[in-house]
Image (tube, rainbow, N blue to C red):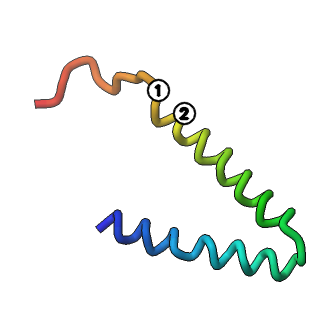
Amino acid sequence: MAQSIGYLLAAGGPFLVGVLHEASDSWALPCALLVALGVVQAGAGYVAGRPVTIGETPAR
């Protein structure tokens, strides 16, 4: 289910980039948005990949 929702959200990406390109008549705004999203995703990946133990004992 989560994969289906992810694909539905991702399908709007190229459309949004095209709309931003047409509205701004430049690639600067769509590219800036993609770079900003990449920075956010890199930060989320860094936080998610930390070697952190949540509890002292394993769950049963």
Question: CB of mark 1 within 8 Å of CB of mark 2?
Answer: yes
> From the viewer's perspective, is 9 left or right of 28?
left
Query: Label 1, on which residue?
Result: 50
Query: Label 2, on which residue?
Result: 46
Query: Distance from label 1 to label 2 (Cα)?
Result: 6 Å
Label of residue 18 in the image: none
Element on which disc 1 rests: loop
Residue at (67%, 76%) from the top-left corner?
16
In the rendered image, which quarter contains the N terminus? bottom left
Q: What crowding class fits label 1: few (fewer than 14 Cα within 10 Å), some (14-19), or many (20 or more)?
A: few
Element on which disc 2 rests: helix
- Front-lying residue, 58 or 21: 21
In the current view of this chain or complex, which residue is farthest to the right? 25
Q: Is residue 5 above or below residue 55?
A: below
> From the viewer's perspective, is 25 left or right of 1?
right
x%, y% of residue 58? 18, 24
Q: Amino acid at mark 2?
A: Tyr
Q: Amino acid at mark 1?
A: Arg
Q: Is residue 55 above or below residue 41?
A: above
In the rendered image, which quarter contains the C terminus? top left
Residue at (60%, 71%) from the top-left corner?
13
Residue at (70%, 72%) from the top-left corner?
17
Q: What crowding class fits label 2: few (fewer than 14 Cα within 10 Å), some (14-19), or many (20 or more)?
A: few
x%, y% of residue 45? 52, 39
> From the viewer's perspective, is 8 left or right of 39?
left
x%, y% of residue 35? 73, 52
Q: Is residue 3 above or below residue 56?
A: below
Quarter holding residue 46: top right
Question: How many labels, in total?
Answer: 2
Residue at (47%, 26%) from the top-left corner?
50
x%, y% of residue 44? 55, 42
